Amino acid sequence: MRGERFGAAVRLTAAAALSAAAVAHAVAGPGLPAPDVVFRGVAGEAVRLSDLRGRPVVLAFWATWCTRCLDELDHLRKVRADHAEDRLAILAVSVDEDRLDLDAFLARRSYPFIVCHDPAGAAAAAFRESEDLPFTVVIDASGTIRRVFREFPVGAEHRLDAAISSVLR
């Protein structure tokens, strides 16, 4: 009897530890509050996600070597032309490991929105569980995640535009 209780206690302790680990590594998704992460802008400024509350946010994780990422950034350039900064925040978060590669890329291309650098993927880890790029999160003005997009296949522009329109209402 005593051995059974000890075995049950060990199983419960192990289950609790696994559950706590799962919660600690949980990734934010649709319907959940966006984690309050701090990104580092390429000019060195801190960009806290919670400071953007009050307006919708498009958070695009990308890399300079990712062709579909660059297609999405070009589309976000058009989105910015249609929606002023005070109505919609756009953060393009590079996960490039090498800052020199990012700087060389940005010397050739500029974007009309905030570009951040997350080389270790620390901030990105709060939103995504895989390394797939691009990875885009649409957050409403109250800070709730409304849509998550993995990759950016041909034709994805319409789905992204619809998600952005839904949070601008």
Image (cartoon, rainbow, N blue to C red):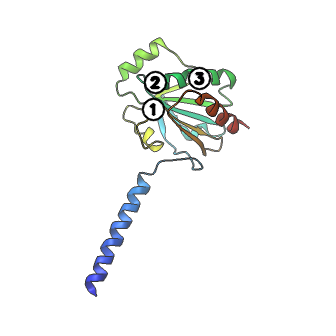
Residue at 58% across, 20% down: 112
Name the residue beneath numbered marker 3. Answer: 75
Please name the amino acid that badge 2 sits on: Val
Circle 1: residue type? Leu
Specify the quadrant that holds the C terminus.
top right
Residue ID for mark 2 = 42
Residue 78 vs residue 52, the one in the foreground: 78
How far is the residue under mark 2 from the one under mark 1? Answer: 20 Å
Crowd class of label 2 (few under 14; some 14 to 19; many from 20; radius 10 Å): some
* Residue count near mark 1 (Cα–Cα under 10 Å), binned few <14, some 14–19, many ≥20: many
Q: Closer to the N terminus: mark 3 or mark 1? A: 3
| In this rendering, position of residue 129 left or right of residue 98 | right
Q: Which mark is residue 133?
A: 1
Where residue 162 sits: x, y (%)? Answer: 67, 34
Q: Which mark is residue 19?
A: none
Q: Secondary structure at mark 1?
A: loop
Looking at the picture, how far across and down is residue 114, in whole percent? 54, 26
Q: Secondary structure at mark 3?
A: helix
